[in-house]
Amino acid sequence: MSRKEEILARLRDAIVNLDYEGIRDVAKEAIEAGLSPYEAIMEGMAKGMDIVGQKYEQGEYFLAELIMAGETMKEGLSVLEPYMKKGEIKHIGKVVIGTVEGDLHDIGKNIVITLLTASGFEVVDLGVDVSAEKFVEAVRKHKPDIVAMSALLTTTMVNMEKVVKALEEAGLRDKVKIIVGGAPLTEEFAKQIGADAYGRDAVVGVEICRRWVSEKG
Amino acid sequence: MKPYERFLTALRREQPDMVPVWELIVNEPVVSTVLGRRVTGTKEDMLNAYCELAEFLDLDGVTWGEDQEMKAVGEFFVDEWGITWRLNRDGIAYPVKGPIKSEKDIIDYSPPDPDASHRLESIEKLVDVFKNERAVVFLGHETFEFSHYLLGGMDRLFKLYYLKPDLAVLLSEKVSEYKCRVIERAIKAGVDAVVCGDDYADGRGPFLPPSLFKKFILPYIKRAVDTTHRAGVPYIKHTDGNLKWMLDMLVEARVDALHPIEPAAGMDIAEVKKRYGDRLCVIGNIDCRKLLTGGSPRDVEEAVKETIAKVAPGGGYILSSSNSIHPGVRPENFVAMVKAARTYGRYPIDKRLIAEYAGRCLYSRLFPEFFGR
């Protein structure tokens, strides 16, 4: 194993082991050893997040561990980002995300944001209680590849359909893929309202987003 | 049997004259429709309307929490803890910001006064109205939810568990001391049971690994249970989600009953009763994710019959929705649920009903991901 490979493996493991306190030192070492920050992120820490996601899917890791892995990644990023040159950050795609109108829950959405960022997406977070008009406005302004919507209530998930309709009316529907998620939702519901996909949980949702942008090329 | 006796008998895992019916929360839009009058948003009218509803539907237990003075700040409300809340359109409050921003804030933080004279005004009123008639159940908390409200997010509490365990314990102690004191006072005021509402799981399972649960959560559940038991009152544990290994630990903490045993999260009430029925009264399970929201009164009746057939025999079952009568529940379905419970819930449970529903599973149609065979 080369020195570079060894540092990348340690970055990866720091994420998997939730080593929040140790990751800064490994990230500094990566810079000192001449690794590009981009490489350290994508080939090191992001690989760790993939493993954490798999462990979460398999029931080996819990929500707390998924969140802590995201926090560890952010800590590593805070060391690496200042060394990144302008234009070096190559995002794999752009996502506009929000919790729909009437709904104030944000934990699920925030986990998705952490995982999307870790996967290399640029994320525009519209927050909670986001109206259909705000989604349309944001799509116009930011020109994302994907619109992601969250809802935790049966009374608010119906507002997801309003967003799909509003995007159709604005002539923007075919410019974006739409993914929806949240506890009360189902695959069937997603189809019915005209979304492109249903993310059963954050890990699956982000997986779908990655597939979409890689298909797009 | 009076409603409160029915409720408490089932809580002791014994068999009352009929299956008791109770709800943790009935939200305002449903209360208004069932009563056929507009309930105003004032605390007084909400409580009055709730009392009317309990009488109207002949619920066996009633539930309310503590009182907090709320300061209006623009579209937000700040309670005595310093937690900022926002109301959604259905009038349900969500915490949006916490007062604790730093480690020093945790050390300096003091909870509100649990002994404040207004603290239990509402529950005292329920005791006045319903004592020796309907079971008055005090809705309290352990430490998890208020700790994350104070920090402004569950993610922040998890981070604290990992990085500053001593401060996490300090914060939990402060919340626990307050919450246990309020439980003691509610029991002195005359409540018949306590239910604590902190959620520890979702449809995927527990939020946190067993090691963290044992260290930061379980000791405070035990403390709340012991506080309640010392005063001679039963303890109902409410938590959403699929509890998996957590269930053993809750039983070990000596909770008397489990609510709401959510089919939408894959919880099988017949299985829970089979495994823990000698130690635990089971409460809930009438689905409010798809059935009470989108089904017909006929479907609801079917679910009630099936649940009664499977878990009511022998007692130790209280019927309720799988969480609460939230604003998405069709009022006619709520009424149908209560009516069906009265029709089919008389002891001894009809043997033909038990035989007829033995092999059925309505939830395999609604939640094939969990109950598909």
Image (cartoon, coloured by chain):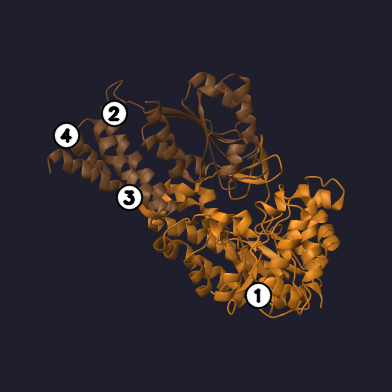
Chain colours: A brown, B orange
Dot 3, how many residues are within 10 Å of its Cα: few (below 14), some (14-19), or many (20+)? many
Q: Quadrant of the N terminus of chain B?
A: bottom right
Separation of residues labelled 3 and 1 (CA atoms): 42 Å
The chain to which mark 1 is attached is: B
* Marks 3 and 1 belong to one chain: no
Write down the residue under mark 4: A32
Q: Residue at x 39, y 31 (%)?
A: A121
Separation of residues labelled 4 and 3 (CA atoms): 23 Å
* Marks 3 and 2 belong to one chain: yes
Q: Residue A75 falls in which quadrant of the image?
A: top left
Write down the residue under mark 3: A18
The chain to which mark 2 is attached is: A
Secondary element under disc 1, as helix, strand or loop, is loop
- The correct choice, above or below, for B346 with respect to B261 in the image is below
The chain to which mark 4 is attached is: A
Q: Residue at x 56, y 57 (%)?
A: B265
> Horizontal and vertical percent for residue B10?
70, 76
